[in-house]
Image (spheres, rainbow, N blue to C red):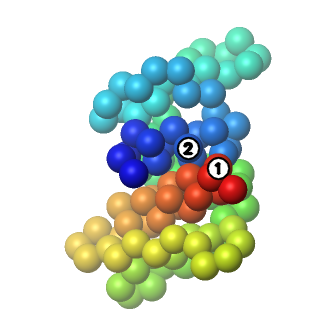
């Protein structure tokens, strides 16, 4: 699954309305209450990732080698190598995308 597909599935799982893909900026999203549009990319933005994890009530565990995020079941594990922050964000997005599939 591409980053675009991951982000789109995660956005839908969390109630965001993705309307336009903007590459590295992520999805341009709209709200239903006439608030301004905003960019949303929890793969690169810590705040977006944390809000996504909280909204979907994900459990996040960051170990010495990998980050693990899940709601129910085995969840998603992402080895972090040199960047545990990026791995944690990706594990969160992958877990959210998996929720959209079910």
- On screen, residue 5 versus residue 10, left or right, reads left
Q: Nearer the viewer, residue 47 or 71?
A: 71
What label sits on residue 54 in the rendered view?
none
Q: Residue lying farthest top?
A: 34
Secondary structure of the residue carrying tag 1 is helix
- Can you say whether 65 is above or below 8 in the image? below
- Left/right placement of residue 71 relative to residue 38 reads right
Asked if the residue at tag 1 contacts the one at tag 2, i.e. Cβ–Cβ closer than 8 Å, the answer is yes
Tell me the number on the disc at residue 100: 1
> Percent position (x, y) of residue 50?
57, 55
Q: Secondary structure at mark 2?
A: helix
Residue farthest along the bottom direction in this orientation: 64
Q: CA distance from mark 2 to mark 1?
A: 6 Å
User: Residue at horizontal 53%, vertical 21%?
Assistant: 19
Q: Position of residue 29 (x, y in %)?
A: 55, 25
Q: Callout 2 environment at 10 Å: few (<14), some (14 to 19), or many (20+)?
A: many
Q: Nearer the viewer, residue 87 or 35?
A: 87
Q: Position of residue 53 (x, y in %)?
A: 62, 58
Q: Quadrant of residue 54?
A: bottom right
Q: Residue furthest left?
A: 82
Q: Is residue 18 left or right of residue 27?
A: right
How many numbered dots are placed on residues in this image?
2
Residue occupying the point 61% across, 20% down? 30
Return the mark for residue 9. 2
Residue 7 appears in the rendering: yes
When asked about the image quadrant of residue 56, the answer is bottom right
Q: Where does residue 38 sit, x and y in percent of width and height?
A: 52, 24
């Amino acid at each position: 699954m591409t980053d675009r597909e991951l982000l789109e599935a995660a956005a839908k799982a969390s109630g965001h309305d993705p309307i336009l893909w903007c590459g590295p900026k992520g999805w341009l999203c709209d709200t239903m209450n006439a608030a301004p549009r905003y960019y949303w990319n929890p793969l690169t933005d810590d705040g977006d990732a944390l809000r996504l994890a909280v909204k979907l009530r994900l459990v996040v565990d960051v170990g010495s080698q990998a980050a693990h995020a899940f709601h129910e079941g085995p969840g998603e594990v992402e080895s972090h190598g040199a960047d545990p922050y990026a791995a944690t964000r990706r594990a969160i997005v992958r877990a959210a995308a998996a929720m959209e599939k079910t």
